[in-house]
Image (cartoon, rainbow, N blue to C red):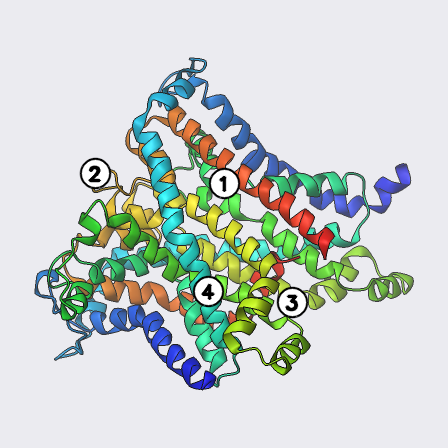
Amino acid sequence: MKKEWKKNAIVYIVLIPILIHFVIFQVYPFLLSFYLTFMDWKVIGDAEFVGLKHWKYLFSDTLAWKAIWNTVKFSLYYIIPTMALGLILALIINSGVRGAKFFKGVFFLPVVTSFVIIAGIWGWLFRGSEEGMINYIIGFVGIEPQLFLSDSSQALAVLAGLSVFKVAGSTMIYYFAGLQSIDRQLYEAARIDGASPIKIFWNVTFPLLKPIHFYVAITTTIGSFQIFDSAYLLTGGGPNYATTTIVYYLYSQGFTSLNLSYAAVLSYVLFFIILIISLVQRRYLGKESNHY
Amino acid sequence: MKKVISYIALTVLGFCFLMPFIIMVLGSLKDVEYAQLDPLFWIPDEPTLKNYKYILSDGLFLRWIWNSVVITIIPVLSQMLFCAILGYIFAKKHFIGREFIFWVFMGVIMIPQQLLIIPKYIMFSDFGWINTYWALIVPEIWGIMGVFLVRQFLQGIPNDLEEAAYIDGANDLQVFFKIILPLSIPVVATVGTFSFISNWNDLFQPLIYLTQETMFPVTLGLASILGKEGNFGIEMAGSAVSFIPTFLIFLFFQRFFTEGIQMSGLK
């Protein structure tokens, strides 16, 4: 036992400060957050124990449920288009075209770009007046100018569009890796059997990408539940709370209304949702690896 | 035929993806109020660098850039070092509690950062860290994801080299700095590029921990002039200037982003 300590002395010298850091900045805040949900935390003075008051309030808070519903709606607008666009980009890049490397970079560029920059441009493209570029373009096909971000039935979809644009490049990378790992002989065999390219895609490529579809679906779902930046930058949660997502509501409860305890409850709601999604992933991916 | 479709799709999609960046650059060269903006895709009649001069002569904007540099560079360097060391320890060293600690680390990845922000805000208020760099630097000096990436990478490398070095009488430090670190350069670069992008682009944490304009990083500063300025050209010039570091990192380290994404994903 003593020998083990001595042999690994250097490991413990590194590990102990890191573990202390880990406890201070990850474990302790996680527990403190849970404790906070049972307290009334005032900026000045002592915290007061209030039991389940904030948790009970959650169930009667229609705005919280609207925020959850908005986030689910956002996911619906966002997940499938991101996956489809990512797959299309990967298929094009993988088809042996010249300049594929350059375009791979182009498609990935938004992934590394700040939301602030893209939102600045997006806000201009989707201006809700006739001077907006998208309104100008749709004017050609005879569509009336739309209000976009100021219309409560459209704003969330416009924000989802921004996220699709921003994230599709990383989805492309996963699909690209998946496409490259497919055995070429399978395509050869299908071609010899006289299958058309579309048939090959639906019967060979698409099913073989199954683990990737699943992984990408999970990660984009988790990402969509954490969406905040675009709502903060472009709509401020409006119009009429149409773009108030869970994280935006958490932010405005905690840091605009200074209702930190209730914001902690909301952050636990987010945590439970993400936990469930992650557990589904673990379970499914575990099964998947048994099969293959 | 298939090729033709591919080329058409490539051109159309490539244009769509580049368009925001083209708008940013062209817009930054235009001196125009929001209200006067022309919806046409436009080339500025009289390109001007006025907006850049305005942005760069504004001490506040330069200060924002500097703040971003400070809160990005320090975490990037320390993440590369600490994640390399920790990744090595978890991949190659056998010590009591290794599996347990790593299992806890992986569990914590599932906690959304938004959950930690409220208790951290309270903690940092107590520490006196609000409106300081500390709040944005100290928690970011190492990261679980980076440790995971380095560990994955080193697990795929045979132990022979290390063992040979130990037989030759090398100590742990020598083995790490002379053998493991040089071997890990690609994955350590990946950790660094990811860390750069996430710190440079972060909006949420600065928004919470900083209220003084002089402490803002460039993301938050830009967000504060978005719309308020009323001048599209100035917004776009600000965006373009803040985009340059990201773009340069992207150009030089593009390979590491894609490798990192693949490594972090399907294993």
How packed is label 4: few (under 14 Cα within 10 Å), some, or many (20 or more)? many
Front residue of this view, candidates A55 and A97: A97
Q: What element carries label 3?
A: helix
Residue A234 x, y percent position in the rendering: 25, 50
Same subunit, labels 4 and 3: the answer reads no
Give me the disc on residue B112: 1
Residue where numbered disc 4 is placed: A86
Q: Do circles 4 and 2 both sit on a common chain?
A: yes
Q: How crowded is mark 3: few (under 14 residues within 10 Å), some or many (20 or more)?
A: some
Q: Is residue B229 above or below residue A245?
A: below
Q: Quadrant of residue A80?
A: bottom left
- Left/right of residue B236 with respect to residue A289 in the rendered view: left
At label 2, counting other C-alpha atoms closer than 10 Å, the crowd grade (few under 14, some 14-19, many 20 or more) is: few
Look at mark 2 in the image and give the residue it sits on: A240
Q: Which chain carries label 4?
A: A
Which kind of residue does numbered mark 1 sit on? Pro
Chain letter for mark 2: A
Give the residue displayed 37% in from the left and 56% down from the top: A163
Q: Which of A192 and A279 is in front in this view?
A: A192
Q: What residue type is labelled 2?
A: Asn
Q: Which amino acid does label 3 sit on?
A: Ile
Q: Determine contact: label 4, label 2, CB under 8 Å.
A: no
Residue A145 visible, this angle: yes
Q: Which of A66 and B3 is in front in this view?
A: B3
**In whole angstroms, how far apart are the C-alphas of marks 4 and 1?**
24 Å
Report which residue position mark 3 lands on.
B185
Q: Where is residue B202 in the image (x, y as percent from the top left)?
A: 41, 51
